[in-house]
Amino acid sequence: MSLRRILFVLLILVVLVVLRPSAVKSEVQRIYTQRDTIWRLLSLVVIVYLLYGLYTLWNGGYAW
């Protein structure tokens, strides 16, 4: 990601927080209550990705 894109995303986030602080606060609280589910999903995705990489290596998909 380029610096320009990162700054653009940060600018959008700041504008949203400034324009609708109550909506942002309630959304952050909702996400915080679901943090266990989010961690489980992210862990599952990372594990599946690593298993796919091992499977690809096992089948000789990468030429060293």
Image (spheres, helix red, strand yellow):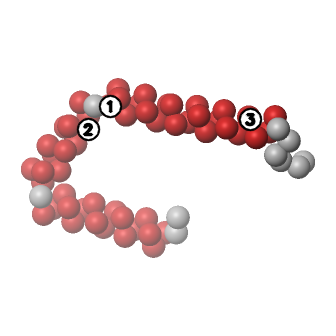
Check residue 31 in the rendering and tell me which mark sits there, or answer none.
2
Residue lying furthest bottom: 4
Mark 3 or mark 2: whose residue is earlier in sequence: 2
Residue at 17% across, 50% down: 24
Foreground tag (1 vs 3): 3
**Identity, as a three-letter code, of the amino acid under mark 3:** Tyr
Residue at 27% across, 60% down: 13
**Identity, as a three-letter code, of the amino acid under mark 2:** Ile
Check residue 55 in the rendering and tell me which mark sits there, or answer none.
3
Mark pair 3, 2: CA separation: 34 Å
For label 1, the residue is 35
Q: Position of residue 46 (x, y in %)?
A: 56, 36
Foreground tag (3 vs 2): 3
Element type where label 1 sits in the image: helix
Number of disc labels: 3
Mark pair 1, 3: CA separation: 30 Å
- Structural crowding at the residue carrying mark 2, measured as other residues with C-alpha within 10 Å and reported as few (<14), some (14–19) or many (≥20): few
- Structural crowding at the residue carrying mark 1, measured as other residues with C-alpha within 10 Å and reported as few (<14), some (14–19) or many (≥20): few
Mark 1 or mark 3: whose residue is earlier in sequence: 1
Q: Are marks 1 and 2 in contact (CB under 8 Å)?
A: yes
**Identity, as a three-letter code, of the amino acid under mark 1:** Arg
Work out whether residue 9 or residue 44 is closer to the camera in this orientation and state it.
44
22 in relation to 52, above or below = below
36 in relation to 13, above or below = above
Q: Position of residue 2 (x, y in %)?
A: 52, 69
Mark pair 1, 2: CA separation: 6 Å
- Structural crowding at the residue carrying mark 3, measured as other residues with C-alpha within 10 Å and reported as few (<14), some (14–19) or many (≥20): few
Tell me which corner region of the image, top left, top right, bottom left or bottom right, holds residue 9: bottom left
Tell me which corner region of the image, top left, top right, bottom left or bottom right, holds residue 16: bottom left
